[in-house]
Amino acid sequence: MKTRSHKQDKVNVITLGCSKNMVDSEVMMHQLQANDFEVVHDSNDEDANIVIVNTCGFIDRAKEESVNTILQYAEEKAAGNIEKLYVTGCLSARYKENLEAEIPEVDAYFGTVELPALLEKLEADYKHELIGERVLMTPPHYAYLKISEGCNRTCSFCAIPLMRGKHISKSIEDLVKETKGLARNGVKEIMLIAQELTYYGLDIYKERKLADLLYALSEVEGIEWIRLHYAYPSKFPMEIFEAMKKLPKVCNYIDMPLQHASNSVLKRMRRQITVDETTALIEASREIVPNIAFRTTFLVGFPGETEEEFEEMVDFVREMRFERLGVFQYSHEENTSAHDLEDDISAELKEERAARLMEVQQEISWEKNQEKVGQTLKVLFDRVEGGYFVGRTEYDSPEVDNEVLVPTEGNFARIGDFANVYINEATDFDLFGDIV
């Protein structure tokens, strides 16, 4: 067993990118604390002598932010403000050799699954008995639950398998144990995340087991909301919607990135699904769960995307009337099969198409929100800000979806608690109301 004599070490963990990276940082921080390190997260204080940057390498903007952050702390190290600088995460996994050559000030680079090696570099032990435990960086009443790592899909535009590897599911037993631990610490809402939820269980159980997992997690006392993120539409296991219908704790919400709605583009993207199949899936989901909130994302500017193909996507969005929608602009990623195609859509046109698509969604969102005026909705409150208690309905995930704003004057709410809110006003992306 290693022992550390320099207990004055303080580590600042900087997290970039998605919720999956956040969970990795939470696990890392718990391991560091168990090894007697003082740990802070995204701190602006200047008293940490060690910095660990957990990077994102998903698209160009994310890579640029990661590189700039590494350079910022490399300058801090050169100036003598910090002693050690380590880099981990997706960018480090994908471009380790390049980064070592270009930013040699970093003491060591690690991939997405090299936490034990990082701890060893810090003369710390990887404590296996802590698996499933972490320091929450979210508000204490909700947490992300990573149910698997990696991805076996072959989407032509996506570099995630290069950084995260093949799909590896966690067992139902381990996830239930982890969820019980979260519940004991006051978590009321868990958001299931993975690169691809519907593949869950195929590697260890030889069949899709997401629905079984939902039944098991619903038994955990203290958990009131279970939310599904990042599902793949092709060959979608419909028993998930049946579980959603039967289980009160499973939010009537699903995040399913569709990426496009032109058959020719979907084929070039290698999405293994057609527009008709997608339409049938959405209609079936709404038939089984009539009040489901469908969140999706689309990708504009894929190589060769014509105006006609883009308009097919716009028409599809108008027809489907999604409750929640986000838009990404295509990023030309090395070592993906789409990189062999010419990135022939200008940055200006990508930006214009993204804005046009979001304009359509903005109108849909406004209309759907107006329908909620006069309704009473169950709301979970996340924070107080600008004279309002700010919360969410079961149809909204933190940071990406609509919010419910209740004036602090004349109302009382506890952060982390539920309350029924009468909606008396609505804008494009927010609801306003009073507690009843």
Image: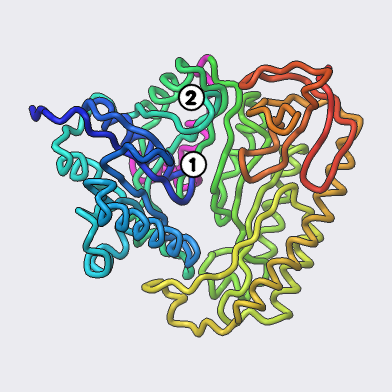
Label number found at residue 400: none
Residue 401 lies, with reference to residue 64, above or below; the image says above
Q: Are marks 2 and 1 in contact (CB under 8 Å)?
A: no
Residue at 34% across, 45% down: 168
Image quadrant in which the N terminus is located: top left
Occupied quadrant, residue 333: bottom left
Number of numbered labels in the structure image: 2
Which of the pair 146/281 is nearer the observer? Answer: 146
Residue at numbered disc 2: 216
Occupied quadrant, residue 146: top left
Indicate the position of residue 291 as horizontal and vertical percent values.
Answer: 77, 37
Magenta part of the chain = 196-221
What kind of element bears circle 2? helix
Extreme-left residue of the structure? 1
Question: Alpha carbon of mark 2 to alpha carbon of mark 1: how far?
Answer: 16 Å
Of the numbered discs 2 and 1, the one sitting upstream in the chain is 1
Residue 199 magenta: yes
Residue at 55% across, 48% down: 231
Residue 21 magenta: no
Residue at numbered disc 1: 193
Residue at 63% across, 28% down: 382
Q: Label 1 neighbourhood size at 10 Å, few (<14), some (14-19), many (20+)?
A: many
What kind of element bears circle 1? strand
Indicate the position of residue 38 as horizontal and vertical percent values.
Answer: 29, 29
* Amino acid at pointer 2: Ala
Judged by depth in the image, the label closer to the viewer, 2 or 1, is: 1
* Amino acid at pointer 1: Ile
Indicate the position of residue 166 as horizontal and vertical percent values.
Answer: 34, 54
Residue 249 lies, with reference to residue 70, above or below; the image says above
| 148 relative to 389 in the view: left or right | left
